[in-house]
Image (spheres, helix red, strand yellow):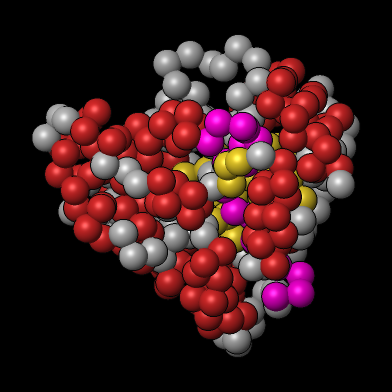
């Protein structure tokens, strides 16, 4: 099992130590570095900037939001990064949620599965460069053919020859239909809030996709990259308390109250009552109480926190469950130094 450094997206300001963490990650043996985007910083620019100081680690987006760019614009960014990095790019894509898609990008959120399939198909056409890129739609018609079209559009072939036609495309997916689609059309699954306890359920979803006619991969050559905090500490309680506000935000406050994909993930794990309570408190403005309502076991289901012996044992559990890469957040060089023996062992 390999490790990826998850840098995420920026808060109010760019992180001050990201560059040194990226360099340290390569030195420590990390396989990849990932950036994200929400409604602030984008994913491609920091990845290209920080990645320029590296030679080996793969450079991935986890994730680029579909609605932020047309499929061809995303393909242009990915093929450019792949050339500049010498073939190290990983294109991670995700649909985001209706609040961001409709509130920030001004795009309809409907039909996320069919939009994803169409989007990925167009990107693969660009990367293959076997002919002019076309799409019948309905979401991304190429050439554009709706009632307000000029009629002058024509199919085009990318000017730049992509470095790799098989540049890996990984999809962020949380629900059963999305995960099955990921196994069918993608090269890897970016799993958020993964728990080894439900590996049999995830594998059933994946197997459905692998079994579909024309599936791109099989389990033997498909990557499962799970986001999981890996924290070496002699004081697990302090770390759990630090993480409670973050978990209450994602469970109780992220997305719309009636459609929060992160909350749905934890409901599938069996935390329905706790999710309801956290959501009620968070939406009522009682954020401290919402954080206090997050139980230890909910956090520990999807993260690895403890001393070195416990962490090593849990890493074996996650690997046995089928995870090929752990995406971990690292706060500083001291934490990176503590993780290095685990990564290199």
Residue drawn 42% across the image and 52% down it: 297
Q: Is residue 230 left or right of residue 337?
A: left
Q: Nearer the viewer, residue 130 or 166?
A: 166
Residue drawn 31% across the image and 59% down it: 271
Q: Is residue 239 left or right of residue 289?
A: right
User: Quick check: can you spot residue 336?
Assistant: yes
Residue drawn 60% across the image and 53% down it: 226
Quarter of the view holding residue 33: top right
Total count of labels: 0
Q: Which residues are magenta?
A: 219-236
Q: Nearer the viewer, residue 125 or 37?
A: 37
Residue 345 image offset from top left, x and y in percent: 86, 47
Residue 135 image offset from top left, x and y in percent: 51, 64
Q: Nearer the viewer, residue 139 or 314?
A: 314
Q: Is-magenta flag for residue 191?
A: no
Residue 170 image offset from top left, x and y in percent: 62, 56
Q: Nearer the viewer, residue 234 or 289?
A: 234
Give the residue furthest to the left: 284
Quarter of the view holding residue 76: top right
If the image is split into quadrants, where does the N terminus sit? Answer: bottom right
Residue 209 image offset from top left, x and y in percent: 56, 78
User: Quick check: can you spot residue 75?
Assistant: no
Residue drawn 45% across the image and 21% down it: 11
Q: Is-magenta flag for residue 225?
A: yes
Quarter of the view holding residue 58: top right
């Amino acid at each position: 099992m390999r490790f990826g450094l998850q840098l995420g997206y920026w808060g109010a300001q760019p992180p001050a130590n990201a560059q040194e963490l990226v360099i340290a990650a390569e030195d420590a043996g990390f396989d990849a570095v990932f950036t994200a985007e929400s409604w602030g910083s984008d994913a491609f620019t920091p990845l290209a900037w920080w990645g320029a100081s590296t030679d080996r680690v793969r450079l991935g987006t986890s994730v680029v939001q579909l609605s932020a760019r047309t499929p061809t614009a995303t393909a242009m960014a990915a093929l450019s990064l792949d050339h500049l990095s010498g073939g190290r790019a990983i294109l991670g894509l995700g649909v985001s949620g209706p609040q961001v898609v409709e509130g920030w990008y001004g795009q309809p959120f409907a039909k996320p599965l069919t939009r994803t399939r169409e989007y990925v198909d167009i990107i693969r056409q660009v990367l293959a460069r076997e002919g002019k890129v076309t799409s019948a739609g309905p979401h991304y018609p190429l050439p554009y053919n709706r009632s307000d079209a000029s009629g002058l559009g024509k199919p085009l072939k990318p000017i730049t020859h992509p470095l790799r036609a098989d540049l890996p495309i990984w999809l962020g997916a949380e629900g059963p239909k999305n995960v099955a689609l990921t196994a069918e059309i993608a090269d890897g699954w970016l799993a958020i809030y993964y728990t080894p306890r439900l590996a049999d359920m995830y594998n059933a979803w994946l197997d459905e996709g692998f079994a579909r006619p024309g599936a791109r991969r099989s389990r033997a050559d498909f990557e499962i990259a799970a986001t999981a905090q890996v924290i070496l500490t002699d004081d697990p309680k302090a770390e759990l308390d630090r993480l409670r506000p973050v978990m209450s935000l994602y469970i109780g406050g992220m997305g719309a109250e009636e459609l929060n994909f992160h909350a749905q993930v934890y409901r599938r794990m069996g935390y329905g009552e706790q999710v309801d309570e956290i959501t009620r408190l968070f939406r009522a403005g009682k954020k401290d109480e919402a954080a206090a309502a997050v139980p230890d076991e909910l956090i520990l289901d999807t993260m690895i926190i403890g001393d070195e012996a416990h962490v090593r044992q849990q890493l074996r559990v996650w690997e046995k469950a089928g995870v090929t890469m752990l995406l971990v957040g690292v706060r500083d060089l001291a934490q990176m130094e503590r993780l290095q023996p685990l990564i290199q062992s």
